[in-house]
Image (spheres, rainbow, N blue to C red):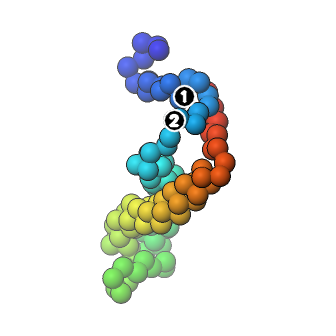
Amino acid sequence: MSNNPYETPRSEVGRSGTMTGDQRLTPGSLFKLLFIGFLFGLGPLLLANGIYDLVTGGESMVSLNESTLSGTSGFIGTLVFIPIMALIFSGITWVFVSIGTWVYSLFWRLNLQFKE
């Protein structure tokens, strides 16, 4: 490991490049992976929509609790909406991916490759 204090330490799994049969991805790690993916995948799109709403002064409206928000309140509503949507999407996806990988692992061995 280098002397860089900001470098993330690598696990044994990351060093070997392959996840073996006795190493498992925990449900919490899977959820974290999905949440981060949705947050940083959908977040910029929703943020761009909020900025567009702020700049146009309400040409594009955000609906929240059956009330329409535009302008600055629409932008703030979008900022609140981003983590909520990431949480909902990752929660739903997590359920299906967890069940799917469990069923798959009953019949076949799941090998994951890691990139250095």
Q: Quick check: can you spot residue 32?
A: no
* Foreground residue among 72 and 86: 86
Relative horizontal placement of residue 51, taking residue 65 as reference (left or right): right
Quadrant where the C terminus sits is top right
* Residue marked by disc 2: 23
Say which residue appears at 40% left-offset and 49% top-offset. 28
Would you place residue 28 above or below residue 59 in this image? Answer: above
**Closer to us: 24 or 17:** 24
Q: Is residue 77 left or right of residue 44?
A: left
Q: Outermost residue, top direction?
A: 3
The image shows residue 17 at horizontal and vertical percentages of: 61, 28
In front of the other: 56 or 12: 12
Q: Using the image, tell me which numbered label, if any, was put on residue 14.
A: 1
- Circle count: 2
Neighbor class of circle 2 (other Cα within 10 Å; few <14, some 14-19, many 20+) is few
Task: Residue 51: give x, y in percent of width and height.
Answer: 46, 64
